[in-house]
Amino acid sequence: MARVIRCIADNVVSPLGTTSRANYDSVRAGKSGLARYESMGNITTPFVLSRVDRGMIDGLCAELGIQGNYTFFEKFLLCSSVQAVREAGIDASSERVLFIVSTTKGNVSLLGQPEEGIADERVLLAKAAAQVTRYYGNPNKPIVVCNACISGVCAQIEAMRALRSGRYDYAVVIGADEQSPFIISGFLSFKAISDEPCRPFDKDRRGLNLGECAATVVLEASDQKKSGWELVCGAIRNDANHISGPSRTGEGSYLALMEVLKECRRSELAFVNVHGTATAYNDEMESIALYRAGLIDVPVTGLKGYYGHTMGAAGIMESILSMYAVRDNTVLATRGYSEQGTTYPVSVSSGTRECKGSEFIKLLSGFGGSNAALLYRFAE
Amino acid sequence: MERKGLDFVVLNQGNAQLTELYRSQIGDWPKFFKMDTLSKAGFVASELLLKKLGERRCGSEEFIQSRAIVLFGSTASLCADRNYQETIQNKDNYYPSPALFVYTLPNIVTGEIAIRNHWRGESSFYVLEAPDAAQMAFHLACAFQDSVTESILAGWVDSRNNDDFQVFMTLIRKEDAADTDWLAGQLQLIINDLNK
Amino acid sequence: MEELILKLKQEIIEVLNLEDIKPEDIDNDAPLFGEGLGLDSIDALELIVLMEKNYGIKLQDPAKGKEIFKSISVMADYIQKNRTR
């Protein structure tokens, strides 16, 4: 029973807008949410971060009628998903609707700064996710994908599988992460953060930037032929090499790519939206994986130069923007890129390019040696 | 004919148990001592299970994709999170530790197991409110939709503090997941042992 | 210098969780990375923290670390010359 899995609604909330369309238009116009911070709390090393205005989120929640004692992270999940769920026009309280949350650290900021009226147990990821299912009156038990930076792609893949099983008709997949001092200090301790806007694939790249974003896709399982974005397939593969550094030969990324390429119609492949964090190792590894997978001539685009690394939201937000880009026949500029800086010359550009085709691949890597890829196709 | 139940390992007796088991049953992976409690628990339980199953290990240049690792838990990396938080909490003693930070993601457990065993298949971590057998069985069955996956090292791993953990590991073959009710029943038997 | 070398070895063993290794097992001139103790990239980052915490030496560039952490002798020498604690 090969049901078609279709994206019927989407939303992105970030410093660049509170809807997917607003975000796409901002990125198309070259805007970025990145800003340099000299310090934050106990952190005294400068870093670059794309941070969402808390007042903006509170205002958005008020506008959407979201009331309740929620942490920032939970408000983030809600204000994005509420918009997508409304657009989808589904009954989110139905047992045929599965909610999946993608996040790396959830409410971890509660460890450093407990909040009035928020129970300690909310630091547990499923308890935070339960705030969402409870908000919608959804009877299904919460499930959180916590697979490092690839979580957003994994969550979509798991939703696809859950829908294909026949048990559910819809899946609401929400990804978000708050960039608290916990995460920022951690990446600084790894000397992985640049103090200037990041430069994916550039020969002078100096590290990643962090970012905040919440993104949602609503997927449906359908036996009908309809126009729309189909989630065709996805794969998750481990390097089996090192817990924090990527495999020098891009093993996991290569394997994930090869798996999704089995269903890809090469003539229809518009571009590959990569992880492109602008660390020395990641971008080099991705160039190798793309080369080994025979994709060195396919246009490549990276969004970290607009948003920074948005962790749990990345896989979802970057997929959504890719959908808008393909429909716009556009390969978005890889902001921050200037001069080729990887062993294999990936087809990345600092300017926008035209593209044809109805498919894109989303590729991500993360701590724990994890890698994931998915393939979306627009059917007319 | 009665169907063969799942082989499994359950551990929950504190850090000393993990170290003792490592020294007496494993002993050839010094990286063990760098791991946080969650990873130690997952690592040791997986090693004991593989020993129990008598599986051949991959050669030094051999890697396989057919074995997935899918773990569940409710605390995720909370214990490691607290340890790391301590290194950044105090302005006067502010020394963020990269070795602690790297363990503040529960999927690192799957990474450690993948590295040890040369498994390049799927590795996933799901956070649930509690070890729910039906919920776990459903998502494990879903993992077999990846046509490359022939078997899954599945388990539950939790750690509330440095000395406290609960872990079970089991091996699920494709045919074990064909009937999710049966699989849930098997997982429930293991979960019953987890809390003893 | 002898005292510093011993202290350094003990600190490294503790901070890097080198459980079954004693100071006398570490050769002063043996490489710390690659062969020898077989330390990795995360260990290198922890050594950078150790330098600051215990000796007040700030290293911004991890690449510089690779040179300084070549061996215990090289490391001790660098600390002796640059320590502020």
Image (cartoon, coloured by chain):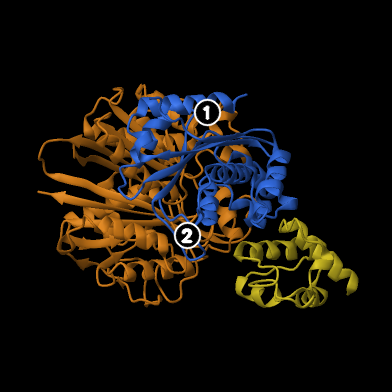
Chain colours: A orange, B blue, C yellow
Left or right position of A207 against C7: left
* Residue A53 shows in this picture: no
Within-10-Å neighbours for mark 2: few <14, some 14–19, many 20+:
many
Nearer to us in this view, B49 or A225: B49
Nearer to us in this view, B147 or B97: B147
Marks 2 and 1 on same chain: no
> Residue A3, how many percent across, how many down?
19, 38
Within-10-Å neighbours for mark 1: few <14, some 14–19, many 20+:
many
Name which quarter of the figure residue C6 lies in.
bottom right
Left or right position of C66 against A268: right
> Residue A126, how many percent across, how many down?
48, 32
Tag 2: amino acid: Asn
Q: How many marks?
A: 2
* Helix, strand or loop under label 2: loop
Q: Residue at x 62, y 55 (%)?
A: A43
Q: Residue at x 40, y 31 (%)?
A: B137
Q: Chain of mark 2?
A: A
* Residue A315 shows in this picture: yes
Nearer to us in this view, B55 or A247: B55
> Residue B139, how many percent across, how many down?
38, 35
* Helix, strand or loop under label 1: helix
Tag 1: amino acid: Ile
Question: What residue did someone put label 2 on?
Answer: A209
Position of residue B43 relative to residue B115, above or below, is above
Question: What residue did someone put label 1 on?
Answer: B190
Name which quarter of the figure residue C36 lies in.
bottom right
